[in-house]
Image (spheres, grey):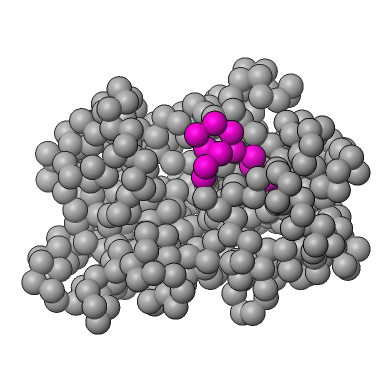
Amino acid sequence: MSIPSPDSALFPTRDNNAVTPLVDGAVAFDRIASAIEAATSSVWVCVAFLEPEATFPNGRGTFFDILDDAADRGLDVRALVWHPEGPSAEAEDTLCADAATAEMLSERGTRWQLRWDTVGRNCQHQKVWIIDAGTPNEIAFVGGINITQGSMADSSHGEPTFGERNERYSNIHDVHCQIQGPITSDVHTNFVMRWNHASEQDKTFGSWPETETNDLSDVVEIAADAGNVKAQITRSVLPDLYSELPEGENSVRQQYLEAFKAAQEYVYVENQIFLSRACLDVIKGTLERGVPVLALVPADAMPELAAAKAHPGIAAAYEALAKCGEYPNFCLAAVAALRTWGYEEIYVHSKTAIIDDQWATIGSTNLVFSSFQGDTEMNVSFWHELTARTLRTQLFDEHGGFSSGELEGRQAIEKLIEIAEKNTANREDGQPLQGFIYAIEPNNWAK
């Protein structure tokens, strides 16, 4: 059975794209910074979480340094930044629309444009870069990586030299994606929609320079072909948030559900929050058909999950996860590295899935109802065996410490599950792990 595309998506599937998965932040941010350095007209970015002092790989400086350099070269530089409200207003590592941010930008002499956008008590969670928008060189980056120091880790996940030892977010595994071709025009359209309707732009501190930002023109031409990959941009957008989407969009959810249901050989998931009851119910049916499923999550899950476990939706998801754990072909796993002082947990922040070496998705969407029906999200899905298989091989080789490229997908995931289970026993004995992956109990996760 082939994996269908969601009919609820505003943007269609588009052929003839180039899609390059970027595993871990050191690779992703090096590629992003290189694209910015080569840019000739514009650099635009959607920001959710940001540590202003975080430095990009290879001595490139901070987010602000890189965008200042681009602006100094005469490029059109814009950042669309999430402004948290309600309980989210206390979120760490956010660049809020306030006097402190305005003072910082003034002191830096920032000459490029910023607008802030909110979505009530939810999060503007897209992490998107688009370079040279609307030109023949247009290139975009879509994924889930935040601009933080812990997100700059490479695939070796060496011990961090900053922060406290084994701090939750100091050593992060994540995934992003570089895209070129017709679907970059959909990323372009998304940015224009959000930029032109940014909720805070006319409020005090809601734009920079205040009263001096300008709107963008609509996309009028689809980008030229760049490869042979069929791909699609899917989103989560609340109804009435933007005039172009009065009914909103929930195509990421539909895509995940249909992909899980269609799986024949294997399902591999990496996600920071693996607590969507709808997805877990479908995965249970997939397990019943004998399909192996491996889900990689952070062992040290964000504490907000445990705090919210009394919520009916979250509670039901915990129950659904426990039911999946009853199947021998299901494995919930995490990643860690042995140090001289013990095991350091590597925080899984990625939001990706691969099915049957035929289809994969990379984006910002967590598998939880709030990402589907609250937060603003973007994923890129692609139907291309070589690209999906290459991503699977990169991830399995990193996590499992073995060469999976010559194995078929089902063989590879069964081998990875075997390694995860052996590593759990090794960890209990204080022994080194093969790779980083180890199996954990679904009944105890995030509680």
Q: Is residue 308 left or right of residue 162?
A: left
| Residue at (77, 54) in percent of width and height | 103
Residues in magenta, as a range: 81-91
Q: Does the magenta run of residues contain 13?
A: no
Q: On the rendered image, what quadrant is the N terminus found in?
A: top left
Q: Quadrant of the C terminus?
A: top left
Residue at image coords 53%, 55%: 145
Q: Tell me: 397 left or right of 88.
A: left
At 86% from the left and 58% from the top, the residue drawn is: 111
Snapshot quadrant of residue 431: bottom left
Question: How many circles with numbers are drawn on the protein?
Answer: 0
Q: From the viewer's perspective, is 421 left or right of 160?
A: left
Q: Quadrant of residue 446?
A: top left
Q: As displayed, is residue 40 above or below residue 200?
A: below
* Residue closest to the eye, 379 or 150: 150
* Observer able to see residue 267: yes
Where does residue 157 sit, x and y in percent of width and height? Answer: 39, 73
User: Can the viewer see residue 252?
Assistant: no
Quadrant position of residue 190:
top right
Q: Provide residue 227's location: percent of width, then percent of height.
A: 65, 56
Q: Position of residue 171 (x, y in %)?
A: 41, 66
Q: Is residue 90 magenta?
A: yes
Q: Position of residue 173 (x, y in %)?
A: 42, 62
Residue occupying image coordinates x 86% and y 43%: 210
